[in-house]
Image (cartoon, rainbow, N blue to C red):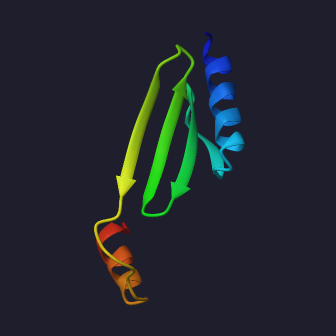
Amino acid sequence: MNAMQKLLDFLTKLADSNLQYSLECNRGEAIMVLIAVPGERWEVEFFADGNVEVEVFKTHGGVKGESELDRLFKEFSD
């Protein structure tokens, strides 16, 4: 199966499963599918050569308050 068909089949399966997703292109050689489900964020990248990479990010705690936004800028801004 070629790389484009693999991506299209995956998108169809997401739609059939009523899973919301968005697409991004952060590198010239891949298309990323972003899926958010409760407590997890999935990044699935489809490469032109047919390779697929999957990263899953899980929460490690509960919901934070607005004060957590200060930490975002303190720790991650230039």
Report whether 55 appears left or right of 2. left
Q: Quadrant of the N terminus?
A: top right
56 versus 68 height, above or below: above
Of 68 and 14, nearer the camera is 14
What residue appears at the point 31 percent right and 77 percent down from the top-left corner?
74
Q: Which residue ends up furthest to the top in the rendered image?
A: 1
User: Left or right: 78 with respect to 45?
Assistant: left
Q: In which quarter of the image is residue 67?
A: bottom left
Which residue is farthest front? Answer: 17
24 left or right of 71? right
Left or right: 40, with 11 as reference point: left
In the depicted view, which residue is nearer to us: 74 or 67?
67
The total of numbered circles placed on residues is: 0
Q: In this view, does 38 lie above or below 33?
A: below
Residue at image point 47% right, 19% down: 51
Image quarter hosting the C terminus: bottom left
Q: Which quadrant holds residue 53? A: top left
Q: Position of residue 66 (x, y in %)?
A: 43, 89
Above or below: residue 42 compared with residue 64: above
Tell me the quarter of the picture where residue 8 sits.
top right
Q: Which percent across, then down, holds residue 72?
A: 37, 74
Percent from the top left, x then y, of residue 39?
A: 42, 63
Task: Work out whether 25 lies above or below 47.
Answer: below
